[in-house]
């Protein structure tokens, strides 16, 4: 007997599989937006675990995404020729393996960021994560094998609707299940009051690192899907702006509110697309949105009393 | 040896600029306990203010350069006060995270409004001061722009020290950073002092912006991000909230960065500052001159 949330997961996987079968008959423009939505949902939900549920403000999520994207892309582009024959030419075996490797290397980076975060709070942590994100970008820029500042080209287009939304569904399920498990209550405890949590015998250090590692893992997976969707990645695409974009999704949806964050991710993706014709004014509107939102509704657009965490 | 001293001079001059920007971060942190992310973009506006003022002033003269500097400082002081009043004052009692995100929003707003108003293409900054290279011997070269950096920074540092230590409003600033509630109880107008702090910090950023543009004469609306982040690192290095610490941190960071570049790590130039930051936060989170604070429940 499966739990209700597991039915949701299976249903979402099935729907995305069926949808991907019809992807040829969908307008490529809408397909593009849909895949971007899926990637952004994954990124925002994985950041929500760090920022929203555990309360550790991270500004370096794009860095984790970059590591995942580059690792996965390097595996499929350089090792793909050798590995594919071993797998009988089946890309559906190679692709998840490459994604998984990307996720693992990103979570290793998450571990590296998580360790100094034990001693830092709030503003400092934000700056250090920002710094890590920038360092990752600079290092990638300086590695010639992955194309340096020119970027990496010729990545095969393995990402379909199934992979994107399947990943999004798995991310949402994992974060949801993790936070609602007995173990996961610790994340919320760290967020609510770190000192009290520690006094209750919760290993706050461990929870913070776990949040970073899990969050980075899914960001890495999202990066891999992104790389195999765009077929081209460059270090500039994973800069501070991208991190901010993800943070805004989490804030807009409401920290620690998964449903709200999903809605916000979809809404912002569509908004970004539809504002594209306004060119420069798009980012001005975007920044005004952040300021006004913070002054008037810091809890996020989609956090209403009925959606408050139950018994948290 | 000459090479080393030359690099030292270059490092000091960029370090002095970092110090000027870092002072703004540290003072705002002192009174409000948050990182004013938009500070680096006030720095950018300062450089652009100098650029536009220079059109109406005689360039390459002492008077013209000085007027451009003072004008830009006044404009940025106003800008800083406006930002504080519109964006930060409504959030006075909220969590630091809310204010931090708002500050990021203000920063993005300034950058993008700047791209709209000033244009996204880099502009070449005019020569404000008379140009001359000095050769103090041994093959060393010091440009007049570098001398301008040293002189202006020293004058501003002493002026700042006088304001903070000797004037009534400076005393009020220190009182506020010590304990805002108690400061209000003894009759200090907290809003006024905070506004003044922003004006002071922003005018220093403007001076930093102009001095930076004199030495790296290509300005664009995104120019503030990196020097701003490095200046923040400098503030943390010296101990955030500590005014002499910010100056020390700025100079040290400038030296470290220049020496790393001189030793062949030029492509890693921008990563150096963050490496320093992570190291200092791991080893001594309160900074070189800062005091450890124990957390009370």
Image (spheres, coloured by chain):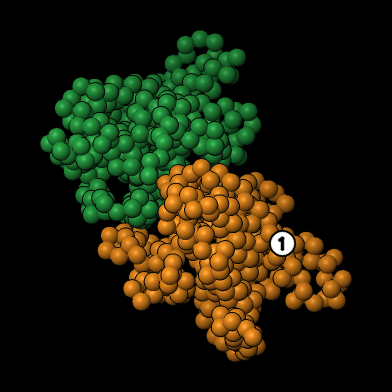
Residue on which the image places disc 1: A101
Up-down relation of residue B122 to residue A16 (above or below): above
Q: In the image, A151: left or right of B186?
A: right
Image coordinates for residue A282, horizontal then vertical, percent: 37, 65
Image coordinates for residue A63, horizontal then vertical, percent: 57, 54
Q: Quadrant of residue B190?
A: top left
**Which residue is farthest left?**
B187
Q: Nearer the viewer, residue B217 or B79?
A: B79
Q: Colour of chain B?
A: green
Image coordinates for residue B281, horizontal then vertical, percent: 51, 37
**Residue shown at 72%/52% (left/top)?**
A145
Image coordinates for residue B297, horizontal then vertical, percent: 38, 44
Q: In the image, B49: left or right of B234?
A: left
Whether residue B219 is visible: no
**Residue shown at 18%/43% (left/top)?**
B191
**Which residue is farthest top?**
B137
Q: Residues within 10 Å of mark 1 (few under 14, many from 20)?
A: many
Q: Colour of chain A?
A: orange
- Label 1: chain letter: A
Whether residue A87 is visible: yes
Q: Nearer the viewer, residue B297 or B76?
A: B297
Dot 1: what SS? helix
Q: Nearer the viewer, residue A228 or B172?
A: B172
| Rendered-image quadrant of the N terminus of chain B | top right
**Residue shown at 64%/76% (left/top)?**
A163
């Amino acid at each position: 007997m499966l739990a209700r949330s597991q039915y949701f997961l299976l249903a979402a996987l099935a729907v995305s599989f069926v949808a991907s079968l019809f992807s040829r008959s969908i307008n490529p423009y809408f397909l593009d937006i849909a895949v971007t939505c899926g990637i952004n949902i994954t990124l925002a939900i994985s950041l929500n675990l760090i920022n929203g549920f555990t309360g550790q403000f991270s500004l370096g999520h794009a860095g984790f995404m970059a590591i995942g994207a580059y690792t996965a892309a390097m595996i499929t582009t350089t090792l793909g020729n050798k590995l594919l024959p071993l797998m009988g030419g089946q890309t559906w075996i190679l692709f998840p393996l490459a994604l998984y490797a990307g996720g693992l290397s990103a979570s290793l980076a998450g571990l590296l960021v998580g360790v100094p975060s034990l001693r830092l709070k709030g503003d400092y942590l934000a700056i250090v994560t920002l710094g890590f994100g920038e360092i990752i970008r600079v290092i990638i820029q300086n590695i010639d094998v992955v194309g340096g500042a020119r970027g990496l080209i010729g990545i095969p287009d393995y990402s379909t609707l199934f992979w994107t939304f399947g990943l999004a569904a798995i991310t949402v399920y994992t974060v949801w299940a993790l936070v609602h498990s007995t173990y996961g209550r610790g994340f919320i405890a760290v967020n609510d009051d770190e000192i009290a949590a520690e006094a209750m015998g919760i290993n706050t250090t461990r929870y913070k690192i776990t949040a970073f590692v899990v969050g980075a893992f899914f960001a890495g997976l999202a990066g891999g899907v992104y790389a195999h969707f765009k077929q081209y990645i460059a270090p500039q695409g994973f800069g501070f702006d991208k991190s901010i974009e993800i943070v805004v999704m989490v804030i807009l949806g409401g920290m620690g509110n998964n449903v709200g964050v999903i809605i916000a991710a979809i809404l912002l993706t569509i908004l970004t697309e539809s504002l594209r014709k306004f060119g420069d004014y798009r980012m001005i509107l975007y920044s005004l949105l952040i300021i006004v939102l913070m002054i008037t509704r810091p809890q996020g657009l989609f956090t209403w009393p009925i959606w408050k965490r139950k018994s948290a | 040896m000459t090479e080393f001293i030359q690099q030292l001079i270059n490092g000091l001059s960029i370090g002095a600029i970092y110090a000027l920007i870092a002072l703004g971060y540290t003072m705002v942190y002192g009174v409000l306990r948050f990182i004013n992310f938009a500070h680096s973009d006030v720095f950018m506006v300062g450089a652009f203010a100098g650029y536009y003022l220079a059109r109406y002033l005689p360039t390459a003269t002492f008077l013209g350069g000085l007027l451009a500097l003072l004008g830009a400082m006044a404009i940025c002081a106003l800008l800083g006060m406006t930002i504080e009043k519109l964006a930060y004052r409504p959030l006075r009692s909220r969590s630091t995270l809310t204010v931090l995100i708002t500050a990021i929003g203000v920063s993005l707003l300034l950058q993008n409004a700047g791209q709209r108003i000033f244009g996204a293409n880099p502009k070449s900054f005019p020569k404000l001061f008379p140009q001359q290279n000095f050769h103090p011997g041994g093959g060393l070269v010091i440009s007049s722009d570098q001398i301008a950096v040293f002189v202006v920074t020293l004058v501003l540092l002493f002026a700042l020290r006088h304001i903070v230590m000797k004037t009534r409003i400076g005393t009020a600033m220190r009182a506020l950073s010590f304990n805002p509630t108690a400061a209000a109880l003894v009759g200090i107008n907290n809003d006024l002092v905070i506004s003044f702090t922003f004006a002071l910090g922003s005018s220093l950023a403007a001076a930093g912006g102009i001095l930076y543009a004199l030495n790296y004469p290509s300005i664009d609306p995104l120019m503030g991000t990196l020097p701003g982040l490095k200046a923040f690192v400098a503030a943390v290095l010296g101990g955030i909230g500590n005014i002499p610490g910010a100056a020390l941190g700025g100079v040290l960071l400038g030296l470290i960065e220049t020496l790393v570049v001189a030793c062949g790590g030029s492509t890693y130039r921008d990563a150096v500052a963050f490496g320093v930051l992570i190291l200092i936060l791991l080893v001594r989170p309160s900074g070189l001159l800062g005091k450890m604070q124990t957390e009370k429940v």
